[in-house]
């Protein structure tokens, strides 16, 4: 089958465009046309963008600039992308797998550090909850299970998980020793660990958040860190970065990193471009791609070929 689109338009910081453009030509086709930034894109192209690097007005302007056949996000999350601006019939995909290994590595490091440094033991037999069962949640669950932890996964669908147990209620996680957040931000997940949950959960629970800061009531976390001796490892906060004098920064039981969990290894583009290439191949052979946020139409159905 022919390629899903004939050209790609990059909306990335200028410092990244040349490297990404060269890698795409090497991975896909050296003859493919690639435009970027404020250059004029071709009709029915792919818009490949880093939504977290641009404000909503800039993204909307580019989305309305031409008729896109496919929009691909360099991120796994899409809470800062105006999905509603994309016309029906346009494929919208995301980097669904690129961040799974780095985030799982960060989680594993945080969980083991807490177990050894603060609990004086390993994770074998420890009750650990994982909230969310996407690529990150699956990998985290598998790793912890294989280390001997008793893992309970909060999964909205309630569907089975390969390792550990599953629940559809966050209230079943109140007695966990450690609790890991790996789910996207949306209306249902916002403030999922609110004041009531933190008030009722086990004293000394350790929270690890690699998703979005809005999933936790930070004010409540601050209160219960003091009154219930809760612990937290936060790679994400509200806002980002936290102001230097923010009270969370002065709590000994709270460790904050500056949204760095996504980065591991020496190749900043490799996993992202692997996801893009995988989706490209799926669309090429007319298979619904992974990481799909909105389905579009396959090329031959539009052209009538």
Image (cartoon, rainbow, N blue to C red):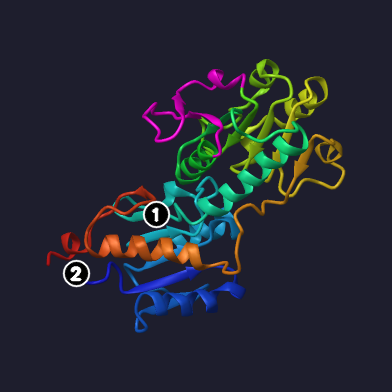
In the visual, does 222 lie left or right of 162?
right
Please, is residue 174 above or below residue 9 in the view? above
Residue 153 in magenta stretch? yes
Task: Tell me if mark 1 has few (under 14), some (14-19) or many (20+) residues whose alpha carbon lies within 10 angstroms of its own.
Answer: many
Q: Which residues are magenta?
A: 147-175
Which element is circle 2 on? Answer: loop
In x, y percent, where is residue 218? 72, 32
As helix, strand or loop, the secondary structure at mark 1 comes to strand
Identify which residue, 173 or 34, lies in the foreground. 173
Q: Is 174 or 56 nearer to us in this picture?
A: 174
**Picture coordinates of residue 84 (x, y %)?**
43, 46
**In the orientation shown, which residue stands out farthest toward the left?**
305
Of the two numbered discs 2 and 1 on the same chain, state the one appearing first in sequence.
2
Query: Can residue 67 be seen at all in this image of the molecule?
Result: no
What residue is drawn where x is 55% and y is 49%? 80
Q: Which residue is located at x 45 percent, y 46 percent?
A: 135
The answer to if 293 sits in the magenta stretch is no
Q: CA distance from mark 2 to mark 1?
A: 20 Å
Q: Which mark is residue 283?
A: none
Answer yes or no: is residue 108 visible: yes
Residue underneath mark 2 = 1
Q: Residue at x 53, y 61 (%)?
A: 50
Q: Quadrant of residue 5?
A: bottom left
**Residue on which the image places disc 1:** 93
- 130 sits left or right of 5 in the view: right
Q: Can you give x and y, in whole percent of width and height, for residue 30 in the image?
A: 37, 83
């Amino acid at each position: 089958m022919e390629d899903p689109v004939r050209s790609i338009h990059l909306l990335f910081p200028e410092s990244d465009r040349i490297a990404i453009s060269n890698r795409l030509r090497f991975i896909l086709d050296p003859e493919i046309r690639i435009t970027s930034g404020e250059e004029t894109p071709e009709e029915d192209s792919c818009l490949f963008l880093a939504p977290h690097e641009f404000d909503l007005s800039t993204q909307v302007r580019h989305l309305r600039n031409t008729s896109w056949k496919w929009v691909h996000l360099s991120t796994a999350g899409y809470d800062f992308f105006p999905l509603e601006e994309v016309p029906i019939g346009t494929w919208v995909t995301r980097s669904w797998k690129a961040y799974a290994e780095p985030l799982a590595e960060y989680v594993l490091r945080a969980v083991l550090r807490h177990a050894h440094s603060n609990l004086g033991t390993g994770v074998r037999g420890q009750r650990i909850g994982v909230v969310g069962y996407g690529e990150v949640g699956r990998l985290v669950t598998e790793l912890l299970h294989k280390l001997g932890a008793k893992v309970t996964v909060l999964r909205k669908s309630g569907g089975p998980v390969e390792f550990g147990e599953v629940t559809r209620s966050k209230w079943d996680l109140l007695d966990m020793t450690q609790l890991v957040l790996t789910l996207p931000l949306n209306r249902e997940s916002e403030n999922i660990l609110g004041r009531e949950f933190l008030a009722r959960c086990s004293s000394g629970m350790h929270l690890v958040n690699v998703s979005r800061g809005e999933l936790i009531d930070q004010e409540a976390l601050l209160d219960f860190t003091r009154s219930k001796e809760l612990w937290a490892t936060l790679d994400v906060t509200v806002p980002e970065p936290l102001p230097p004098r923010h009270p969370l920064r002065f709590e000994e039981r709270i460790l904050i990193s500056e949204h760095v969990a996504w980065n591991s290894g020496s190749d900043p583009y490799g996993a992202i471009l692997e996801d893009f290439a995988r989706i490209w191949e799926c669309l090429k052979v007319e298979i619904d791609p992974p990481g799909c946020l909105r389905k579009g139409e396959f090329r031959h159905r539009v052209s009538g070929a």
